[in-house]
Amino acid sequence: MYMIDSRSQATPPSLPTHHSDRVVRTDRTDRTKVPLPRRPLDPAGVPGDHVRRWYENELGWPTVPADPQNPGDPGGPRDPVRLRVGERFDVLEVPAEAGRAGLRHLAPGSPVAVRGDRMLLLVAAGSAEELPGLLEWLEWGSLALDLTATGEGGVMDAPLPWLPLGRRDPLQGAAVWLRPPGPGCEVEASLPTLSALGGGGGAPDLVRLVDTVATQCHRLWLRRACARPEALSRTGDQALAFS
């Protein structure tokens, strides 16, 4: 008859000791396994359907269908999920260093993404069309600034909603959220807009944001030009007038 001692648990005769140890180790691993979804280190392995559903279902942001010529088979590159720009928001892209200076002009819920050394600031829909005139009005129009805007008809690579487990850094140049949008929230109220000029309403002021990042873009250009005096001499004194 099989007996269990009160001080120790015996192994049933039908189950060898070494096999029992193996079962215990496997069970312990299962109990500590982190719940799905798990993320691969390579962004090419990111489950695009999960990302797409997160944007469409949680945020209500329209996405662009994947390129049928690049379906993302296991052995090849994947077409990234892209967001349709111009319907819910436009995108202002600047060097990350310039973008950091502009963060103080944003609302706490204003979404901001980073991709490598670039920062993507979400602004009100229609802002891209207003940007050239705004830069002229701010007297930045005559200078070439490392600042671009994407509006209606454009797309942007969807920043990853989450990072792989155990990582804090962006993945091989993939865009990630610095300030993620909140699911179920109307993003429009938090976006910088031209109509907020003068402090009207609760939206951030697009004019202050653009003026700040344009100033920082020019300072970055001057810093690089000082290392290449021949580039600075070709632009004349006009570039220095805005420093």
Image (cartoon, rainbow, N blue to C red):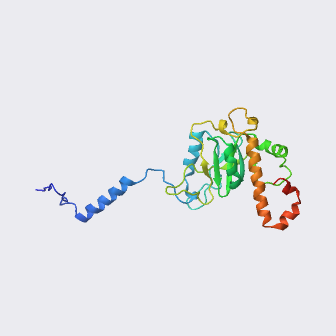
User: For this rendering, which residue is in front, 67 or 122?
Assistant: 122
| Residue at the image position 84 percent from the left and 49 percent from the top | 141
- Residue 148 at what x, y percent from top left? 76, 51
| Residue at the image position 86 percent from the left and 51 percent from the top | 142
- Residue 194 at what x, y percent from top left? 76, 38
Q: Quadrant of residue 7?
A: bottom left
| Residue at the image position 84 percent from the left and 57 percent from the top | 240
Horizontal relation, residue 112 to residue 138: left or right: left
Horizontal relation, residue 230 to residue 61: left or right: right
Any part of residue 65 in sight: no
User: For this rendering, which residue is in front, 192 or 170?
Assistant: 192
Any part of residue 113 in sight: yes
- Residue 119 at what x, y percent from top left? 68, 52
User: For this rendering, which residue is in front, 218 or 40?
Assistant: 218
Q: How many marks are shown on the rendered structure?
A: 0
Horizontal relation, residue 167 to residue 156: left or right: left
